[in-house]
Amino acid sequence: MWVQYAKLEMIFLAKIAARRRVLGLDAPVKAVEAAAEEKEEGGFEGDEIKFPEFKAQSLGQSAMEGVKVDGEAKQDPMNTPALQGAIPLAIFDDAAKQAFFNAEAAQCFFDMFTLFTQVACLPKVLQHVLDVMMERFPTEAATWDCYVRMPLVGVSPLTAEFPGQLGVALGRLAEGKEKVRVKGQLAKKTAKWVEKVLATEGLDEGIKTVLEVTLRKLEWSGL
């Protein structure tokens, strides 16, 4: 139930992120300026008189300095606490105070949060969950599984970024092997995400080889 409450809040944040992309509100300032300049070119076209569209980003600092704006209006709405993940994190923190809360429960939150890669505050949210897990359950397999997988969140196995992030994840796995309480549990959790990556169509042969070797080590040594 707690996870579902937090999920509803993440869905809300995801909808806002999607809407901002549709409206072009998250476009870099330079891109907005370039678009404005492009529209300003030409002046007259046929019998139509075109007027340039003035945007805050294209007016320049000197022109904007004289405009009085209160602190609330000047604040970037995406930097407000609610849109920086404060509500789902508050739900997680409240759940962490309950009797049922353990490493597996925390992992349920972590896994749910990883579904929302389009939400800008996701790294902050995941890091908070991981910090709590490391503090309270430092030797549990669930904690180390989340720690190992975190570098891969939101990274497609088909991108150039993936091999480097995979290297980080496998380095963390080696560290976890020495610190986890029940190695077999971490081995099972690791095999689950490794097999999922291996099932990716078009996966690079080098990555496939590395992951297949990783799987064999898990099977023969129990991690």
Image (cartoon, rainbow, N blue to C red):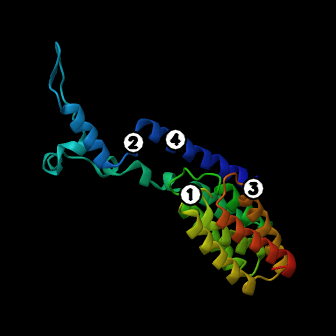
Residue carrying label 3: 199
Question: Reading the chain from its start, which is encountered first: label 4 or label 2?
Answer: 4
Tag in front: 3 or 4: 3
Percent coordinates x, y for residue 63 in the rendering: 14, 45
Q: Residue furthest bottom?
A: 178
Question: Reading the chain from its start, which is encountered first: label 1 or label 4?
Answer: 4
Residue carrying label 4: 18
| The image quarter in which residue 134 lies | bottom right
Q: State the SS at label 4.
A: helix
Q: CA distance from mark 3 to mark 1?
A: 15 Å
Q: Amino acid at mark 1?
A: Thr
Tag in front: 3 or 2: 3
Q: Amino acid at mark 3?
A: Ala
Residue carrying label 1: 159
Q: State the SS at label 1.
A: loop
Q: Amino acid at mark 4?
A: Ala
- Vertical placement of residue 19 versus 138, above or below: above
Disc 2 crowd rating (10 Å Cα; few below 14, some 14-19, many 20+) is: few
In depth, the one of 182 and 41 nearer the eye is 41
Mark carried by residue 25: 2
Q: State the SS at label 2.
A: loop
Q: Is residue 217 left or right of residue 129?
A: right
Q: Are discs 1 and 4 less than 8 Å apart at CB?
A: no
